[in-house]
Image (cartoon, rainbow, N blue to C red):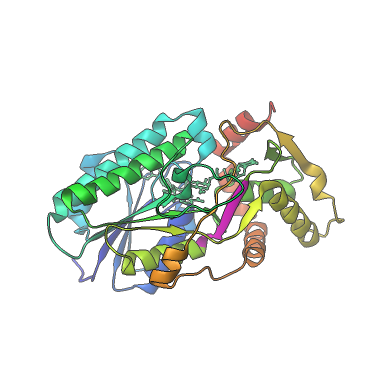
Amino acid sequence: MENFQKRILVTGGAGFIGSHLVRRLLQKYPQNLIVNLDKLTYAGNLTNLEDVENLPNYVFEKVDIVDVIALKEVFEKHKITDIIHLAAESHVDRSIEGPMEFVMTNVVGTVNLLQVAKDSWGKEEGHVFHHVSTDEVYGSLGEEGLFTEETSYDPRSPYSASKASSDHFVMAFYHTYGLPIKMSNCSNNYGSHHFPEKLIPLMIHNIKNSKPLPVYGKGDNIRDWLWVEDHASAIDKIFHEGRIGESYNVGGLNEWTNIELVHFLCRLMDKKLGREAGESEKLITYVTDRAGHDKRYAIDASKLEKELGWTPSITFEEGLEKTVDWYLENSEWVDRITSGSYKEYYQKMYTNR
Ligand code: NAD
Ligand code: DAU
């Protein structure tokens, strides 16, 4: 067994945020082994990591976190010293269609991981279990105010209820057993390799293909967007320098209504695709609202800035342009991803609206 300093288990490393984090950790910390553990659901794809999969500090394990026996085997085989836990069912709309998968992966899977880490590490010092969570656990804001780490939990969708439950178990393992946990709760991410049923990649894909742009309700719901590589840098900071037992909010102070964002993307892509100004905006189609649609999310990330000096590295306009360019240059990736279960999902969700 090679002499790595840390042997870090990253769960969900084949997904959107996980793949950005795995790439960053592999390249920045060659002294550490990164074990990417992923079930490869519809949302996980190893092509996301093709450029780094041959690095000597990378290992992939295809495992379902609900399978506690398989988790124990991976722990023992790789002598895992730390965990960064991202594996989850992550799409609110899918959680409304069927909550049980969310309970299994997000709640049962997380408790399995906590239990395996506790049994394996005992009271040994120097380990970290970093749980990656979401701002959606705080519920929905009115026109004023920001979510802080002290905001009471008020989850309102099956997805956010499952993530809130997993957060509570993480804190319970810290308080009850002294498991060395850290937690981060982040706002909406965007960037390359984002599965194209979430708002931004869906809109880019449909604008490019001149398909309807389905905006839920009046399009006046507000999200706080953060570039995915900035989320990866925040996780890196918190994992290495954050305090044990603490949670940190991560966000970009970057609030947009959905409709403003869709208009912005239309104008940007009209220029990139050489279309007449206003052409893509004609594709905007208002559709039935999401059930229980949270009105506004906005993060106060000042604790992270004050304690660890983290701030986002780029503006939304810069990040969106990079993102659009990536999707236009990687249509093969999108075609491959959208030919499978997404196609059925898309047809079911949008054709009868
Ligand atoms: P994603 O859906 O793109 O990826 C999830 C990954 O988890 C996939 O690779 C999937 O195969 C894997 N996975 C799912 N179920 C599994 C199981 N049972 N066992 C093992 N692997 C499994 O999600 P994402 O957007 O990259 O989000 C990653 C994490 O970050 C999630 O925990 C999510 O709640 C959190 N988060 C996401 C955002 C966001 O905007 N996307 C914001 C804040 C927090
Ligand atoms: O806030 C963090 C969360 O952000 C993460 O925890 C979730 O994993 C992630 O999926 C994301 O959740 P949202 O529900 O905010 O993201 P989504 O891209 O699904 O939707 C963003 C907004 O756009 C939301 O208000 C719903 C709206 N929307 C979405 C889709 C897919 C539309 O209007 N039309 C659409 O077709």
The quarter of the rendered structure image containing the N terminus is bottom left
Q: Check if residue 227 falls in the magenta segment.
A: yes
Residue 216 lies left or right of residue 227; in this view the side is: right
- Name the magenta segment's main secondary structure: strand
**Which quadrant would residue 125 be assigned to in this image?**
bottom left
Choose top left, top right, bottom left or bottom right for residue 290. top right
Nearer to us in this view, 180 or 323: 180
Segment colored magenta: 222-228
Q: Residue furthest top?
A: 352
Q: Nearer the viewer, residue 168 or 7?
A: 168
Question: Does the magenta-highlighted stretch encompass residue 328?
Answer: no
Front-most of residues 239 and 141: 141
Residue 276 drawn above or below residue 213 = below
| Residue 83 placement (x, y as % from top left) | 29, 57
Q: Position of residue 267 (x, y in %)?
A: 78, 57
Q: Could one spot residue 215 in this view of the protein?
A: yes
Which corner quadrant of the image does residue 240 belong to? bottom left
Q: Which corner quadrant holds the C terminus?
A: top right
In the picture, measured across the screen, residue 112 lies left or right of residue 27, that is left
Q: Is residue 116 visible from the viewing direction of this image?
A: no
Residue 43 or residue 183, whichever sits in front: 183
Residue at image coords 20%, 45%: 115
